[in-house]
Amino acid sequence: MTLAESAPPRPDASGHYGRFGGRYVPETLMQTLVDLEREYAAVAQDAAFQRELQFLLAEYAGRPTPLWRARRFEESLGGRFQIWLKREDLLHTGAHKINNTLGQALLAQRLGKRRIIAETGAGQHGVATATACALMNMQCIVYMGAEDMERQALNVFRMRLMGAEVRRVTSGTATLKDATNEAMRDWMANCDDTHYIIGSVVGPHPFPMMVRDFQSVIGRETRQQILAAEGRLPDHLVACVGGGSNSIGMFHPFFADDSVRFWGVEAEGSGLATGLHAATITAGLVGVFQGSMSYVLQDDDGQIQPAHSISAGLDYPGTGPEHSFYADTGRGHYVAITDTQALDALQRLSRLEGIVPALETAHAIAQVIRMAPDVADGAIVIVCFSGRGDKDVFSLQRHIQLEDESPTAG
Ligand SMILES: *Cc1c(COP(=O)(O)O)cnc(C)c1O
């Protein structure tokens, strides 16, 4: 019996993945979530909706993305196995997030909601949301921690250029988790005319399922592309895990293929022992956080612990319920990569392939480097290349010293 046959449908009717997921929200939001779930079930079956989404993904966002065989990277690791990169970095706005924001904005349009709110940490989800809202002529309000607005001033400017209003959040630690709380509060007050576009496979049901479905285009394309190129399925899928959307989008379409191993890569920051990390599954405990049950970074009293990572997109103390379920059942393997390992991998891939990965993506690359000695001869490894590194070059300059090899004049 395969895992798919033995496992219950995911999520179940109440939005649970095993003991994870669900809907832990104030009463006022319950009806909105139930309505959203019903409307989403309708559009998921609606051919016209799916055609329109397909059109936007192809002609606006740039799908399908290439599956690139990284031969120089392969050779640097001994050349015994294949490494392919699923190039989500080549999408409009430079990462996978647009797959979800286009889907949800289209859904909001169907619901007759013309006011969109979103939370953002590094600004990547905010930019992808502002992009979809400009395209579809919707009002866009993005909640962002004051701290993050300082650190990501360029993305704040990009959002404003596209007509979005960026609201500064000063409560708590003034970062992503506080921005999310603020967005939830707005939604509770305005759910009649407002849709909340959550940026990852987190939050109350149906968000983890909905965002997964919108991101599963990654895995579906990958399956077709590797079958066309090599005539067989991959042996290993490797992807970084923040909230977990690019990784679940890659993994989910392969769920029933028992021979395909999933590697979810979390951020180990300065190291597990230092307490400065974002390794939620590796080092967290099960609890309720932002509307659902999942692994969470928390102390013994259940207080949420701040996450730390060089990569803003992985710097989140929660993770999706479906990942928590994969971890508990052994379907997925979850590991952690430090800031230093990610920085090394970023430089190595840049030089070998001429492709600069986002710092988030570099965690997945680093995992391939680490596991290389254990990968079987002839195996196929596919990395979800979630985003491009352009957004990170300013902060990279603080961490990486590059030799000035130009001849000195005079
Ligand atoms: C936001 C982001 C991530 C992390 O988010 P997930 O929901 O875990 O995918 C990873 N890579 C890039 C490039 C991002 O922008």
Image: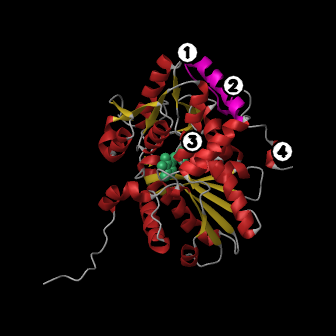
Give the number of marks: 4
Residue assigned mark 4: 5
Front-lying residue, 337 or 22? 22
**Which label is found at residue 28?**
1
CB atoms at circles 4 and 2 under 8 Å apart?
no
The secondary structure making up most of the magenta span is: helix
Amino acid at pointer 4: Glu
Question: Is 80 placed left or right of 152 in the picture?
Answer: right
Residue assigned mark 3: 100
- Whether residue 262 is visible here, answered yes or no, is yes
Q: Earlier in the sequence, mark 2 or mark 3?
A: 2
When the figure is inspected, residue 167 is found, relative to residue 318, above or below; the finding is above
Mark nearer the viewer, 2 or 1: 2
Q: Which residues are magenta?
A: 15-44
Picture coordinates of residue 183, whole percent (x, y): 45, 27
- Residue found 52% across the figure and 39% down from its top: 199
Amino acid at pointer 2: Arg
Looking at the image, which residue sits at the far left? 410
Residue assigned mark 2: 38
Mark nearer the viewer, 3 or 4: 3
Q: Earlier in the sequence, mark 1 or mark 3?
A: 1
Front-lying residue, 200 or 94? 94
CB atoms at circles 2 and 1 under 8 Å apart?
no
- Residue found 62% across the figure and 46% down from its top: 55
Question: Is 34 placed left or right of 387 in the picture?
Answer: right
